[in-house]
Amino acid sequence: MFVFTQSNSADGNQLLSCRRDDDGRLTVLTPVSTKGAGSGTAHLPSQGSVILTDDRQHVFVTNAGSGDVAVFAVRPDGPELLQTVDTGTAPRSVAERNGTVYVLATGDPAIHVFRWDGAALAPIAGGPCTLPDDVDAAQIGFGPGGRLVVTSRGRDELLAFPVLDSGLLGDPVATPSAGPTPYGFATTSQGIVVVTEAFRAQKGAAAASSYRLDGDRLTPVTASAGNGRSEICWAVTTPNGRYAFTTNFADGAISRWRIDADGSLVLEDATAGLTQDGRSGLRDEDLTDDGRFLYAIDADAGELRGWAVDGVGVLTPIATAAGLPATVAGLAAF
């Protein structure tokens, strides 16, 4: 069991790994080169720059500086680099399902499509899917009905693409975001999408919304519910679909939301977890597959932090791994 993040260093990106024990404690492993370059800047604006494949046997890492994605096998003693493949300029987010991989390139905005055979990536003929220049996308990922969803900060909307049998994408259906600056999102097993809204760094104005699929369109269930904190950017949902956790970049807090059966989003605790109240830098997060542990990176402190999660979503601090670079980005745990 591991937790992965990336250094995002411009002079040689690295996959940073920690072994996780049964109690959630972390042991730092030796970094492994991605054979590519990160952006070299702190606070990479993305969710999903490091992901695990559905079978948990491989890790994909975006190299935002060199325009490629690194593929790693998860070995018992840590990750092993298998391949680095070109993906277009400034890739920041990646998603995988059923042998198809989608990479969000943000320099020349496009979605690049690859076939994944369990050992290597190969481009699918007919891609990539070009995006408008003003999309300013933060994440690509799967929403309800198997649709591929992209958050557009530039247009304040969500784009839902049907996935064709070939793996290529059909024409997207755009849904206006319930609040400004839609950023990261997560989908529950019941098909509800929870989307964070950073509100373009307005102090105390951040919020989150929930959506369900109505035909081809995402329809808001709860529209822009505030939590009184600042810059909500990242979201995860528990395996049972009952809770969502969002990280507040500008003030060091993790908020807990209850997700009701109809998809309504209810704020339960704006500060369910804290690094240091009021300190910026809390970023990407992920839950382990069993939902017992939540991990998040605190870029400004150079730390990977961990919490135990109980049956009603209460967070208890259990682990800290220090020494991360300020450029650190992305997080995947299992």
Image (cartoon, rainbow, N blue to C red):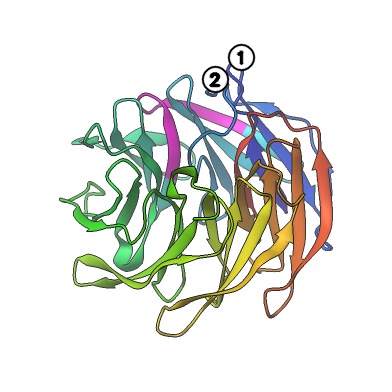
Residue 261 placement (x, y as % from top left): 45, 85
Residue 11 placement (x, y as % from top left): 61, 14
Looking at the image, which residue is at 53% across and 57% down?
235
Which of 83 and 140 lies nearest the eye of the viewer? 140
Among the two numbered marks 2 and 1 on one chain, the one whose residue lies closer to the N terminus: 1
Secondary structure beneath dot 1 equals loop
Looking at the image, which residue is at 46% across and 73% down?
189
* Circle 2/circle 1 CB separation < 8 Å: yes
302, above or below 264, in the image: above
Residue 283 placement (x, y as % from top left): 61, 45
Q: Name the quarter where the C terminus is drawn.
A: bottom right
Whether the magenta-drawn stretch holds residue 183 is answered as no
102, above or below 176, in the image: above
Q: Do we see residue 128 in this rendering?
A: yes
The picture quadrant where one finds residue 33 is top right
The secondary structure that dominates the magenta segment is strand
Q: What residue is disc 2 on?
A: 37
Which of 170 and 126 lies nearest the eye of the viewer? 170
Answer with left or right where residue 147 lies relative to residue 276: left
Q: Amino acid at mark 1?
A: Asp
Q: What residue is disc 1 on?
A: 11
Secondary structure beneath dot 2 equals loop
Looking at the image, which residue is at 41% across and 36% down?
121
